[in-house]
Image (cartoon, rainbow, N blue to C red):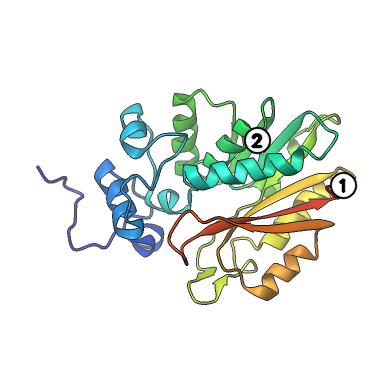
Amino acid sequence: MQHPNHSPSLAYDRALLLHGVKRNEALTLEEVERYGRESFGAPDYVSIYGMSPRQWWPRGIRLLGRTAVECTQDSLADRIGSDVASVAAQMSASRWTVIDPFAGSCNTLFWILRHLPGAAAIAFESDARVFELTRRNLSSIDSRIDVLHGDYESQISQIRVPADRAIAVFAAPPWGRALDEAKGLDLRRTMPPISEVIERVTREFSGRVLLFAMQVYEKVEAASLAEVRAQMDWSELRAYDINEKGQNHGVLLGTRGWTPG
């Protein structure tokens, strides 16, 4: 029986889910798999929390169209988490608090915690529907991530990170229309620009050593990349060969107040 939301004429691609009619709709299992199949040749592409769609769907986990596009799937989130931990290991701190200003699905935060055992995690989500879905999703997997409803800019001053904890920040604001397949990802056009996120977090935690992890595309617009790297005491760009060439992501790691090695 055909699902009533099924529309054979629609191309289940990034544009439809991020900007089209499916943007704010919770996707069916069929739609999640169709997006993965039509965009990446893999129905299990939107694997999150260590599960394929056919594993997480029966547990009541649900994603909006835009969240399915913007979430970092397991294979990528695992690599980012591993790289964050590899830099964190070069610090003397043994306890960490990880902050995600743009929660979304929280899948990257979930994987960072896997690689930083014992770390605390705080995430902010301004969209009420995304917040409710993510909080419900995380409760179904017994995650220790504390998701707060509200804009990080106004709420970050209300959180307290103990002085004995180092701070890592997964700074990955929504890309929106910042990604141009030919020119790459323009870090000045994310919403908000990456540089503004770095400035706000650094101002809030003045005097603390910080580790930033910023998800990027395989190709990054050169001037925007230089602008962000100039804000760091140390930085390193790492790309991953998970998808077909031209469809890969990576991470820009950076530190404030300390230098690894």
Read off the residue under disc 2. Answer: 122
Q: Residues within 10 Å of mark 2 (few under 14, many from 20)?
A: many
Q: Position of residue 35 (x, y in %)?
A: 32, 54
Q: CA distance from mark 2 to mark 1?
A: 18 Å
* Residue at image point 63% right, 41% down: 82
Q: Is residue 240 above or below residue 112?
A: below
The residue sitting at the right extreme is: 207
* Figure check: 216 above or below 86: below
Q: Which residue is mark 1?
A: 206
Q: Which residue is at 74% across, 35% downward?
A: 159
- Mark 1 residue type: Ser
Q: Quadrant of the N terminus?
A: top left
Left or right: 247, with 206 as reference point:
left
SS for tag 2? strand
Q: Examine the image and state in which quarter residue 168 appears.
A: top right
Taking the spot 34% from the left edge, 44% from the top edge, the residue there is 44
Amino acid type, callout 2: Ile
Of residues 126 and 217, which is closer to you in this image? 217
Mark nearer the N terminus (2 vs 1) = 2
Is residue 103 at least partly visible in the picture? no
Crowd tier of the residue under label 1, counting other residues whose Cα lies within 10 Å: few below 14, some 14–19, many 20 or above: few
Q: Position of residue 109 (x, y in %)?
A: 59, 39
